[in-house]
Image (cartoon, rainbow, N blue to C red):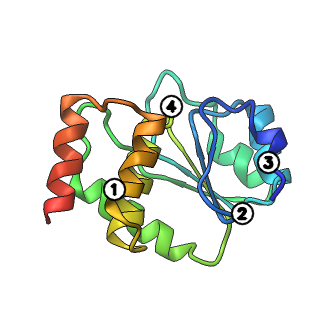
Amino acid sequence: MDDQALQPIYNYRRISDRIGTSGMPTVAQVSDIARAGFEVVINLDQLDSSHALPDEAAAVAALGLTYRQIPVVWEHPTHENLTDFFAAMEDYAHKRVFVHCVANYRATVFMTLYGILRLGWPREEAMNRLHQMWQQPNATWQHFIASELAE
């Protein structure tokens, strides 16, 4: 996958040939995501976020991509949010998926938990990858990560 055009997207990370994550893309960058061959965009930002793109769902659909929003409240991520994310990742297991939020913190945490709990990633390696993106998750997110890994 040639992801040179995706590098300018805030906190873009290539997870695999099938998965990428980032912070909030611009409308122009959504086009770059489509051109890079992604088929699905999953947005973990809240529905009423001040950072949201105007009608992101329509912009993504106009490019022929599938759009899914799982609104995760920054101060209160839930097990149900993570379950919805896991279901979405399984729904699109054979597609190229781009996951984003505002700064790639929610997306990185959810992707890390998915990798560990569903894909069998080694925990230490996955957590090292998480800390490369978000050096020190805040207390809310540390608790969320710990509680999900304990389940």
What residue is drawn where x is 69% and y is 64%?
17
| Image mark for residue 124 | 1
Q: Secondary structure at mark 3?
A: loop
First-in-chain label (3 vs 4): 3
Q: Is label 4 or label 1 in front?
A: 1
First-in-chain label (2 vs 4): 2
Left or right: 141 as drawn, with respect to 70 = left
Distance of label 3 from label 1 (alpha carbons): 26 Å
What residue is shown with label 4? Answer: 102
Q: Amino acid at mark 2?
A: Glu
What residue is shown with label 3? Answer: 3
Q: Position of residue 118 (x, y in %)?
A: 37, 73
Discs 2, 1 touching: Cβ within 8 Å: no
First-in-chain label (2 vs 1): 2
First-in-chain label (3 vs 1): 3
Q: Amino acid at mark 3?
A: Asp
Distance of label 2 from label 1 (alpha carbons): 30 Å
What residue is shown with label 2? Answer: 39
